[in-house]
Amino acid sequence: MTTKERVLAQNKVGKLTEIGRFIRDGDSVAIGGAWLSSHPMAVVRQIIRSGIRNLHVMTILGSVDIDMLVGAGCVGKVTFSFVSMEAYGLAPNFRRAVEKGGLKYDEISGLAIIIGFEATGRGVPFLPYRGPFGSDYLKQRPEFYKQITCPFTGEEMMAVPAIKPDVAIIHAQRADPAGNIQIEGTAGSDLELAKAAKRVIVTVEEIVPTDVIRENPFKTKIPRFYVDMVIEQPFGAHPTSLVPTYVADPWHMMTYMDMAATPDSFRNYLHQYVMKSEDDYLEAAGGLKQMNLLKKLAREVKSL
């Protein structure tokens, strides 16, 4: 293989409009980020634009990502620990879907979900841990939690099965064309997702030469051999934050909550903000002026 052929073979750069190569109707999709931070919102919006349906969405601490996908009719089932808009209240689309009984769901403790992803990454069918003894999780999800006895100490423990999503979607600060992913601030459980999934899509604020990645190798949290496609998409986590690059957008979150209050007004939200293109979305959400403000606020917080 020539040098040029090796370079091309390692080039995993793709376009947002190409996610259909890796995400298909009926897939299980693990979504990175947590709370209102670092969710791969550009991919979430592109899933909606692409008309992908019947997804089994997996999240540890979901928010607007889960709510938007559920409201747009893309989700057949949710495995989750927690879905909330934090200070903005309950997730309106998610709540309606659960209350009406039209959405299948598995509510699992956050630690158990993480351990399930970790088991897959380690190549084992399950992992044990101490908990959640005394919880109704055991009664409600007996197919997921199994009480076992440690063969070495005789201690009673709980086992959870390996969780293997078809796809993981993640947003990070930067990558090189080969897919080496650098994350600043908290990485949450994104590495566990990347290790567990069959296919991994990562959007990043910027794609840089590999030499730039090598200057700060300690920031590389997800190495290239876990990644199938990397997409340069500035502000790809908006309206959630990407600490320390930019803060979450409270103005857009309030707009979202207002427009997600009813199914009709949420359809208007999708039409106004989502269904065109990602560039159109960012412009509708305030454009470069608003995005620079979110960056400025992050710098000011960091300097405190």
Image (tube, rainbow, N blue to C red):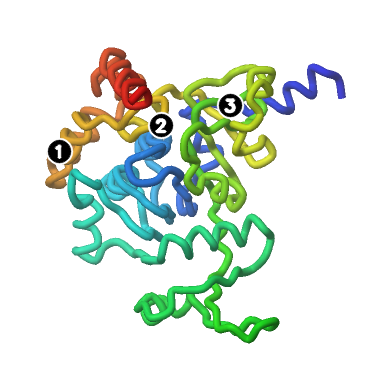
What residue is disc 3 on?
Answer: 175
Label 2 packing within 10 angstroms: few (<14), some (14-19), many (20+): many
What residue is disc 1 on?
Answer: 259
Measured from the top left, where is residue 266 in percent x and y? 18, 40
Measured from the top left, where is residue 124 in percent x and y? 67, 65
Precedes in sequence: disc 1 or disc 2:
2
Measured from the top left, where is residue 270 in percent x and y? 24, 35
279 sits left or right of 180 in the view: left
Mark 3 residue type:
Ala
Secondary element at tag 3 = strand
Image quarter of residue 141: bottom left
Precedes in sequence: disc 3 or disc 2:
3
Residue lying at 19% horizontally and 57% vertically, measured from the top left: 96
Relative vertical location of residue 246 with respect to residue 88 in this rendering, above or below: above
Q: Quadrant of the N terminus?
A: top right
Kindly report which numbered mark, 3 or 2, lies closer to the viewer in this rendering: 2
Residue lying at 50% horizontally and 48% vertically, measured from the top left: 189
Label 3 packing within 10 angstroms: few (<14), some (14-19), many (20+): many
What residue is disc 2 on?
Answer: 243
Relative vertical location of residue 221 with respect to residue 206 in this rendering, above or below: below
